[in-house]
């Protein structure tokens, strides 16, 4: 892993094309793998039947909600963090990162609990029919549980990317 000085060099002294590749390539690869996962998932589930594929379509928006919350706190904090780190204000940067992480996770925990409590109405509102509902539950329960880790991952990846450690958190 690169030292803090090496990462700060990328921000302050490195030529722009090389800095863009160094900082941008790992997150792009991580997003590509994530998109590939969704395509492969849809391919295999699509062979099971229409109701099963419908369950994925009904449950997927919950993932995007958590992604949005994670990006709100992660990407929002990363801009401010990068400026703080550029000023070498490490104490305020630490406080900012902690606030973003714990506030974002707190909101995600509340949303996950609400998703479990109101699972049926949420699925119906998104478009689940009676034939889709059992599959939506089978797919939704483990997915909703995993959203806690997913939300943490999104926030944390953005926070550490603001420090220039993009290859640590991508994926």
Image (cartoon, rainbow, N blue to C red):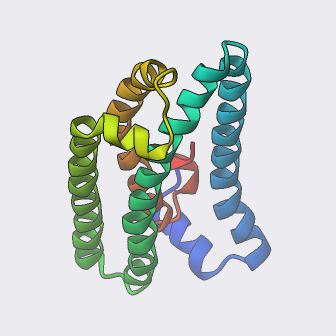
Q: Nearer the viewer, residue 166 or 70?
A: 70
What residue lies at 76% left-to-right and 68% top-to-bottom?
Answer: 18
Image coordinates of residue 62 in percent, x first then y, are 44, 45
Image coordinates of residue 27 in percent, x first then y, are 63, 53
The residue positioned farthest toward the top in the image shown: 48
Looking at the rendering, which quadrant does residue 86 occupy? bottom left
Count of residue discs: 0
Image coordinates of residue 126 in percent, x first then y, are 47, 45
Of the 4 image quadrants, the one containing the C terminus is top right
In this rendering, the answer to whether 5 lies above or below 104 is: below
Looking at the rendering, which quadrant does residue 147 occupy? top left
In this rendering, the answer to whether 85 lies above or below 143 is: below
* In the displayed structure image, the side of residue 57 where residue 153 appears, left or right: left
What residue lies at 21% left-to-right and 41% top-to-bottom?
Answer: 113
The residue positioned farthest toward the bottom in the image shown: 87
The residue positioned farthest toward the front in the image shown: 130
Image coordinates of residue 70 in percent, x first then y, are 40, 58
What residue lies at 65% left-to-right and 48% top-to-bottom?
Answer: 31
The residue positioned farthest toward the right in the image shown: 17
Q: Nearer the viewer, residue 65 or 37?
A: 65
Q: Nearer the viewer, residue 139 or 152?
A: 139
In this rendering, the answer to whether 107 lies above or below 171 is: below
């Amino acid at each position: 892993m690169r030292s803090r000085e090496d990462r700060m060099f990328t921000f302050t002294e490195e030529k722009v094309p090389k800095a863009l590749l160094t900082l941008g390539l790992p997150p792009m690869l991580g997003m590509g793998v994530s998109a590939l996962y969704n395509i492969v998932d849809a391919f295999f589930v699509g062979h099971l039947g229409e109701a099963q594929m419908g369950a994925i379509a009904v449950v997927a928006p919950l993932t995007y909600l958590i992604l949005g919350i994670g990006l709100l706190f992660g990407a929002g904090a990363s801009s401010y963090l990068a400026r703080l780190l550029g000023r070498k204000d490490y104490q305020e940067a630490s406080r900012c990162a902690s606030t973003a992480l714990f506030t974002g996770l707190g909101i995600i925990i509340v949303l996950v609990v609400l998703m479990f409590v109101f699972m049926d109405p949420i699925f119906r509102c998104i478009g689940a029919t009676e034939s889709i509902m059992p599959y939506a539950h089978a797919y939704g329960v483990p997915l909703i549980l995993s959203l806690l880790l997913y939300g943490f991952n999104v926030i944390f990846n953005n926070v550490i990317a603001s420090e220039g450690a993009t290859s640590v958190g991508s994926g």
